Image (cartoon, grey):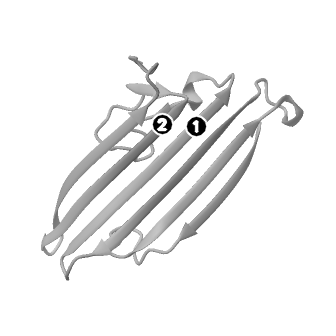
Amino acid sequence: MAQVQTLRALRRDSTFYPTKGSIFNFTGDFFDQAWGSKRQYQTYKLSYSGYRALGEKQVFAYTGIISSANQNVPFYDLCFYGTNNYLRGYTGGEFQNRRMFATQVEFRRKLKRKIRARSVWRSRQYRPSMERVSI
């Protein structure tokens, strides 16, 4: 059992293909024996995504993510690249640690009707003690 606190602000013009606006999301999960959990730890996730139209058919999209896991956190609640759309293209669980910072920038263009192209640039940062693991 956990106590979960979430703060979300959605200001985008479309759910599936936003061209302007932003999404802000903060989540804090608090696990404690007082709430029926067998473990005691906290996880925090903060993300911001922005969308800017560059003309009629082009969109500049960017995302920044910060994640932290504290105390005796189990491996499945650590910060992962490649999950929850955090740095798409990474295998979920390939990189994991207690702290994570990541950014992703995309340039999107509509080509014809329902055909779209995307170019993606990514960066990531983690603590030096991060190890490569296979799950």
Label 2 crowd bin: few (<14), some (14–19), many (20+), radius 10 Å: many
The amino acid sitting under disc 1 is: Ser
Q: Horizontal placement of 99 versus 28: left or right? A: left
Label 1 crowd bin: few (<14), some (14–19), many (20+), radius 10 Å: some
Q: Of the residues under marks 2 and 1, which one precedes in the sequence?
A: 1
Quick one: quadrant of the C terminus? top left
Tell me whether the residue at label 2 lies in contact with that at label 1, contact meaning CB atoms closer than 8 angstroms. yes
Q: CA distance from mark 2 to mark 1?
A: 7 Å
Q: Which residue is mark 1?
A: 68
Q: Horizontal placement of 43 versus 39: left or right? A: left
**Residue sitting at 51 percent across and 45 percent down?**
66
**Residue sitting at 35 percent across and 43 percent down?**
87
**Residue sitting at 32 percent across and 73 percent down?**
52
Going by the picture, which residue comes out furthest to the left? 112
**Residue sitting at 15 percent across and 75 percent down?**
113
Q: Which residue is mark 2?
A: 100
Quick one: quadrant of the N terminus? top right
Q: Helix, strand, or loop for circle 2?
A: strand
Q: Horizontal placement of 23 versus 74: left or right? A: left
Q: Horizontal placement of 116 versus 25: left or right? A: left
Residue 43: image x %, image y %?
A: 64, 38
Residue 100: image x %, image y %?
A: 48, 36
Q: Helix, strand, or loop for circle 1?
A: strand
Quarter of the image where one finds residue 19: bottom left
Query: Relative to 78, is 122 above or below?
Result: below
